[in-house]
Amino acid sequence: AFALWLFAVVFCSASPPNFVLLFADDLGFGDLGCYGHPSSITPNLNRLAAEGLRFTDFYCTSPVCSPSRASLLTGRYQTRSGVYPGVLYPGSRGGLPLNETTIAEVLKPLGYATAMIGKWHLGVGANGSYLPTKQGFDHYLGIPYSHDMGPCRNLTCFPPDIKCFGFCDVGSVLVPLMHNEDIKQQPVDFLDLESAYSDFAVDFITSSVKKKQPFFLYYPAHHTHYPQYAGPGAAGRSLRGPFGDALLELDNTIGNLLATLEEMGVINNTLVFFTADNGPELMRMSRGGNAGPLKCGKGTTYEGGMREPAIAYWPGTIKPGVTHELASTLDVLPTIASLAGAKLPPVMLDGVDMTELLVRRGKSKRETMIFYPTSPSEKYGLFALRMGKYKAHFYTHGAEHSATTPDRDCPATAVLTAHDPPLLFDLEADPSENYPLTLEGDPDLQAVLEQIQKAKLEFEASMVFGESQISKGTDPDLAPCCNPQCSPRPSCCRC
C-alpha cells in the first residue's frame, strides 16, 4: 500500500513535488521556541513545528560547517568526499569534489529548477571552480564561505551604525556577495543582506511556478553564526539581544517563503525541511547559542555538537506530530530522490530514505549514527557511535568552540582521551551524557556494547577516506576579489 501511495504521489499527481531545504548555522538544539527556549521569537518555525513533524533525535555529521554541508548535499559522510579536517577558507585550493553528486544534480535530470541563497562554504577555487553553479544550481546569491572569514571591524551589523562584534579574520579580503559567479558587492551590506536573499528566493519560487517547473530551493543561512547581524526589520525586536535578533530575521525570511508558497498555490505540493549544520558556539557565551539539555556544543562529538532541531513540513502529506526516530542530514538526499522519482548517485551512500517515516510515521531505516571529530583520521576512526538509545564514546575531546561553560569536558583543555571500554550512555534517560553506564555485572549492557563494537568494525571496513580537500592548503590569490588585478591586496578588494 505504501509503495502504491508513493507511486501516486510521484507519478500521478499534477506536478512533481517541490523542495525547500532550510539550513541554519551554529544553531543549538535548545535555541528555538518550539524546542523549549523561553525567549526566542520564532513564530514561523513554531508554525512549521506545530503543523509538521518535529524530530527529537536528528543529527548532522560534523560539529563544524564545511563537512556538515558536504554530507547534507551528497548523502555521504565527509570522510568519503574529502571535506575534512576542519573547514574551507576564502583562499582554499580544494572544495567539494566535482565528481560528488549534490541534491541539485540529482534533481536536474527531472527538469527541476534549482537555486541557492546564503552560505555555501564548500569551496570557491580557481576561477570559481567549486561554486554552487558548478554543482547543479542554476542560480546562486550568497557569501561563498562563512561571513566571519573577513574583517569585521568597521562593518555595520545592526542599524543605525552598530559595528560587528568581534575581530574575525582581519588579514582576509572583505566579505563578498556573489551572484552566480560574479561578485555583486564587496564588502557585503549586512543590513540589506537578508532582504536581498528573501527577494531572490521569492522571485525564484514565483518564476518557477509560473513556468510550471518543479523547483528545489536550498537556503543555508548565515544566521545564527557569529558575528550576528540583523537589518531594521529584526534589530532590537527580540528578547535575546543580537543572537535573538539574528534568529528572528531568519524566521522572518522563512515566513516570506511560506507566504509565497501559499500565494502561488503550491504549499500543498512542497516539502519544507529545516535543520542546522552543527551545535552552538558556546565560546561566544550569550551570543553563541544554546544546546538545551545537551552536553557541550560546536566542535565536539558530544550531543550538543551534533544533535540538531529538525522539522519536516508538508501540509496534507505529513501529519503534525513529534518523532523520536533516529535520522540525519545524510537522509535528506535519498528522501528527496525517492519523493521526486529521481535516480540515486551510483556511489556508496550513507543516507537512508525517510519517506515512510515522514508520511506514514513508520520506523526509521537508520540503525546507527556515526560521530566523527572535526579532524577525522584513519588512525583513530570514528569517535562515537549511537545505536538505538545507546551511545558509545571511543574517544572524547573538547574544543575551543565550546569553551566558557562550567563543564570541564567541553573546552580545548579537555584533551583527546581514549576510552576502553568506551563510555556508554543511555540517551533517552540521560541526554546530557552525565552518567556513564556501569557494564560490570550487567550482561544486557555488555551485549549492547558488543553490538556497537560490531557495527563500528563493519562501518569502518566500509569507509574509504577521500583525498583531504582542506589539506591542499590555501592561496591568497584565490580569495574572491572584485578587482583581481588591484594592489595592495586584500584591502583593495572593494567595490
Image (spheres, helix red, strand yellow):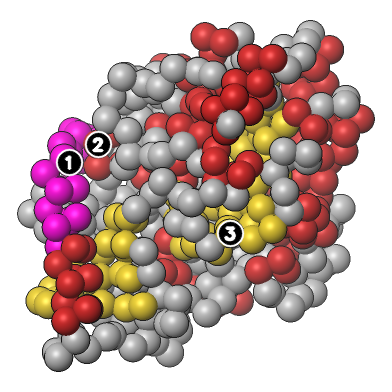
Q: Which corner quadrant of the image does residue 126 belong to?
A: top left
- Mark seen at residue 463: 1
Which amino acid lies under the numbered mark 1 shown in the image of this protein?
Met
Residue 93 drawn at (x, y percent): 29, 30
Residue at 72% x, 31% y is: 270
Q: Secondary structure at mark 2?
A: helix
Q: Which residue in the structure is indicated by mark 3?
A: 323
Q: Quadrant of the C terminus?
A: top right
Q: Quadrant of the N terminus?
A: top right
Residue at 66% x, 53% y is: 53
Label 3, label 1: how many angstroms apart (C-alpha)? 29 Å
Question: Closer to the observer: label 3 or label 2?
Answer: 3
Q: Which corner quadrant of the image does residue 31 belong to?
A: bottom right
Query: Mark 3 or 1 closer to N-term?
Result: 3
Query: Mark 2 or 1 closer to N-term?
Result: 2
Between 229 and 449, the one nearer to me in the picture:
449
Q: Is residue 211 left or right of residue 138?
A: right
Give neighbour class at mark 3: few <14, some 14-19, many 20+ (Cα, 10 Å): many
Between 217 and 430, the one nearer to me in the picture:
430
- Mark seen at residue 178: none
Q: Which residue in the structure is indicated by mark 2?
A: 80
Residue at 80% x, 17% y is: 209
Q: Which residues are magenta?
A: 453-472
Which amino acid lies under the numbered mark 2 shown in the image of this protein?
Arg
Query: Mark 3 or 2 closer to N-term?
Result: 2
Marks 2 and 1: CB-CB under 8 Å? yes
Question: Closer to the observer: label 2 or label 1?
Answer: 1
